[in-house]
Amino acid sequence: MTDLLNKAPELMLKGTDSNLDGGTIASVVITGVVVVFIALILLILFVSIYGKSFDSINKKKDAKAKAEAEAKLIEASKGAAVPEAKVAVNEPPVVEDGISDETVAVIAAAIAAMGAASGKKLALRSVRTAKGARSAWASAGIAENTRPF
Amino acid sequence: MGIIESFLDTMADLASQSGVAGFFADGGWKNIIMILISFLFMYLAIAKGFEPLLLLPISFGMLLTNLPFAEMYHPEYWEYLENVPERTGELNSHFIDYSRILQHGGLLDILYMGVKLQIYPPLIFLGIGAMTDFGPLIANPKSFLLGAAAQGGIFFTFIGAALLNMSAAECGSIAIIGGADGPTAIYVSSKLLSKTDTIGVGTIALAAYTYMALVPIIQPPIMRALTTKKERSVVMGQLRSVSKIEKLIFPILVTVIISLMVPSAAPLVGMLMFGNLLKESGCCDRIAKTAQNELMNIITIFLGVSVGATTRADKILTLSFGKVILLGVIAFSIGTACGILLGKLMYVISKGKINPLIGSAGVSAVPMAARVSQKVGQEEVPTNYLLMHAMGPNVAGVIGSAVAAGVLLSIVQV
């Protein structure tokens, strides 16, 4: 576009130019409006295209998830799965050795609070130490480097 | 006796060197008027809440620069000189002696370097980008058209300024006020205006921010005049939800497309989109928060106070300032009208699904213009929520005015 502008020397004005003639003024106005519209129409096209493609991908995902959920529901309606599911909800979480009951209680309370806030029923299935956890020294180093100054 | 004479002489010297004496010097009365205007702006900012974050620093800069002999800002240091650098051998008529400013300049001279070197406006855009949600625009990309239409005010005002025999640089600088975007107006005018022009960057910035503050007063009458009750009553459907990946792609896409099309717009659009990517990426929260808060606030202080400093009485109290104010309000009004008119066209094409009131938000005063659309819409249907629909054209207007700025900078050569 700049090339196009450069190739049309009558459109190039010096900042000090005054007494601009009607033709020059009209060229500036038409060029300006057209370039702004072309730029934004291009953006409309690109955004619409990728918006639609992502929308269709999301719809496919939603349809798949819905189909899976329906399949599970059909399975559950056959009878056997329902009591199992109920038992699963009431099952105590699997806790890794070395994690205190107090820690489990705190995590469970936090999850319950989150569930109450969002209106969802959440369950704690297991509690285990995260893999690749930093050592106390590494954590201290990061805390030192990232502390607000 | 000698002691008393010496004392009186010293006191007389001190009095003649004081700022009070400066008011009685040639043209000193103009400084008094400018100081009174700064008080008025301070009142508007503090008591009336008109864009206080900008108006207060600008008005205080105005006060400081108009206090005689305070020597915080030296307009003479910023006049362009003619210089022939050995390296190129070509005459440079836009030479500014920065080494002189660094050695002898006052505090406001040093801060003003960020304006003159076009550093502050892109950094403000970085902060705006980090605060903006482009979701409504991505959900309804047609909003871009309204953002483009509202830039009509810029180019139509170019005609008005040219008819008043203003220079091309002045025409471009005044016209950009129609974009209702302070940083863009400062960016364009600081690049274009030179010592031969009768207006300065401060004048343009003052007019731009004044009109941005007056959006709720200027826009509604135009919106009501150009639309019917039926059009204003349109309740728009809910926008689709936008996924995170769409929001991530958007800033990259816009940067590439706009920078390739109009390279002069790259500093503004690039930084706007960089700020947005920081926000949407979710992996740079600390940087995004800094851009939104600390950096934005620091730059706002520097920009406001240094732009205020350029409003020296001898530059402001001129006929040209009157022209800027007049043309500025015309630019702004035409921009609003163009957005509304395209909104009306879209109303017809969409068979009444689009409320034309969202078109006025295409001028990029974010989020004030969108709030005005919401408010005027609710006057007809109290349960109508146009805000998110108006945010689309509003943020499209920011991109549109940056593109328009790039076009003006491409056409008008410094």
Image (cartoon, rainbow, N blue to C red):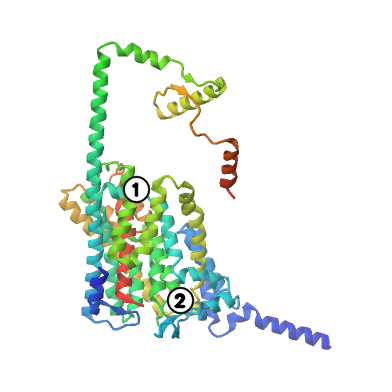
Q: Residue furthest right?
A: B1
Which residue occupies 26% across, 60% down?
B148
Provide the chain ID for the residue under circle 2.
B
Q: Position of residue B325 (x, y in %)?
A: 38, 71
**In the figure, is residue A108 to the left or right of B398?**
right
- Dots 1, 2 in contact, CB < 8 A: no
Q: Are marks 1 and 2 on the same chain?
A: yes
Q: Position of residue B21 (x, y in %)?
A: 62, 81
| Label whose residue precedes the other's in the sequence (1 or 2) | 1
Mark 1 is on which residue type?
Leu
| Element marked by disc 2 | helix
Q: Position of residue A54 (x, y in %)?
A: 25, 43
Which residue occupies 39% across, 72% down?
B189
Q: Is residue B86 visible?
A: yes
Which residue bears the numbered disc 2?
A: B316
Q: Considering only vertical position in the picture, is A114 above or below A94? A: below
Which residue occupies 44% across, 26% down?
A116
Query: Which is nearer the eye, B86 or B134?
Result: B86
Which residue bears the numbered disc 1?
A: B248
Q: Quadrant of the N terminus of chain A?
A: bottom left
**In the figure, is residue B345 to the left or right of B399?**
left
Query: Which is nearer the eye, B10 or B250?
Result: B250
Q: Position of residue B330 (x, y in %)?
A: 31, 69
Q: Nearer the viewer, mark 1 or mark 2?
A: 1
